[in-house]
Image (cartoon, grey):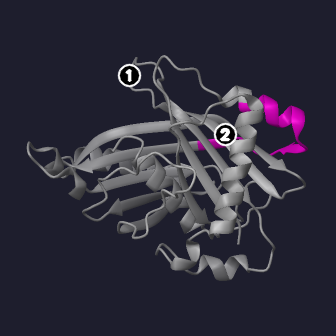
Amino acid sequence: MPSTALFYLPLAPTQTSPTSTLISHITRTLPADPLPPFILDHRLFVDTSSLLPNTDTSKRSFTSILHLSQIPHDSFIGTTGAGAGAAAPPSQPSQSTTPTTEPSLTITSLPSPATDTLTQLIGTKLQPQWAHRQSVIIDNGTSLSLHDGDYTVRIGDLKTSPRGNQPLSLRGTILEVTYNADKDEDVEEAATDGATATATARVGKEDETLLRGVVDALAESAGVSMAGARVFFRKTLRQERGKLPRGVTDWDLVRLYMTALRGSRG
């Protein structure tokens, strides 16, 4: 199965996004074929009881609503159990921020057109239980296939969703790099694990080192600093031209993004 690394680089309002520099460098120096645009929509809610004074935020629960362009026909809602509130530390070269024991996360799919209706339901009928925390989007990111499909790269600026007359605000950069390993595993069989986390979803040290090395080399040669980036790893399903076939759901890709984006606000 492919191995995927998801880098989240937080950016202050005064910082310049490295996205355009990275994309320009990759397309100029590597054999890169364009894939469909990278689009993301993530809406985060937090349990209201954890917002009370003197509450242990490490026991905070979250609900996420996520849509990814890689899975165009579906969106996803995921709810954590208590204990997901501790944000992952910044990545170190010899460490993985994918925890040894992951917080409980229950994920359900829904048709993409129902996303706004569900968001409104949580924000009104369930408001006593869940408070809106943050909504972020990548509205026109870049997806590239490198070295005849050996690697897939997605890059985009993560921005707060527009609310009323408020302008978009840059929150950070998302960089996803997937190493597409041998095609030995059957996609349909891998998809039967459903929304549950499995040990087979963990990326081995060899692939983790490889993916870190790819990103380090890209950043260094482009003159971009990834200092302070958080990185998460997971085995994912193989895609065709940047998308999964209709009816196939990559639960581990969804879990990867929900975990990373939950930590973008915490």
Q: Residue at x 70, y 62 (%)?
A: 244
Neighbours of disc 2 within 10 Å: few (<14), some (14-19), many (20+): many
Side of 119 relative to 194 (left or right): left
**89 to the left or right of 6:** left
Residue at 46% in and 20% down: 13
Which of the 4 image quadrants contains residue 206?
Answer: bottom right
**Judging from the image, what secondary structure is the residue with disc 2 in?**
strand
Q: Earlier in the sequence, mark 1 or mark 2?
A: 2
Work out whether residue 130 or residue 103 is closer to the camera in this orientation and state it.
Answer: 103
Quarter of the view holding residue 80: bottom left
User: How many numbered badges does the structure rendering display?
Assistant: 2
Q: In front: 261, or 69?
A: 261
Looking at the rendering, the stretch of residues picked out in magenta corresponds to 22-39
Please tell me whether residue 251 is drawn above or below residue 266 in the rendered image: below
Circle on res. 155: 2
Q: Position of residue 265 (x, y in %)?
A: 37, 40
User: x and y percent of residue 217 in the render?
Assistant: 75, 42
Queried whether the magenta region covers residue 23, the answer comes back as yes
* Quarter placement of the N terminus: bottom right
**Where, quadrant-wise, is the C terminus in this rendering?**
top left
Instruction: Measure the C-alpha gap from mark 1 to mark 2.
Output: 27 Å
Q: Is residue 232 magenta?
A: no
Indicate the secondary structure of the residue bearing disc 1: loop
From the viewer's side, name the closer residue of 135 and 170: 170
Instruction: Answer whether residue 164 is visible to the viewer in this image.
Output: yes
Q: Residue at x 17, y 50 (%)?
A: 50
Q: Residues within 10 Å of mark 1 (few under 14, many from 20)?
A: few
Viewer-proximal residue among 266 and 242: 266
Q: Amino acid at mark 1?
A: Gly
> What residue sits right under mark 1 in the picture?
164
Place of residue 117 in the rendered image (x, y in percent of width and height, measured from the top left): 39, 48
Q: From the viewer's perspective, is residue 112 above or below residue 181?
A: above
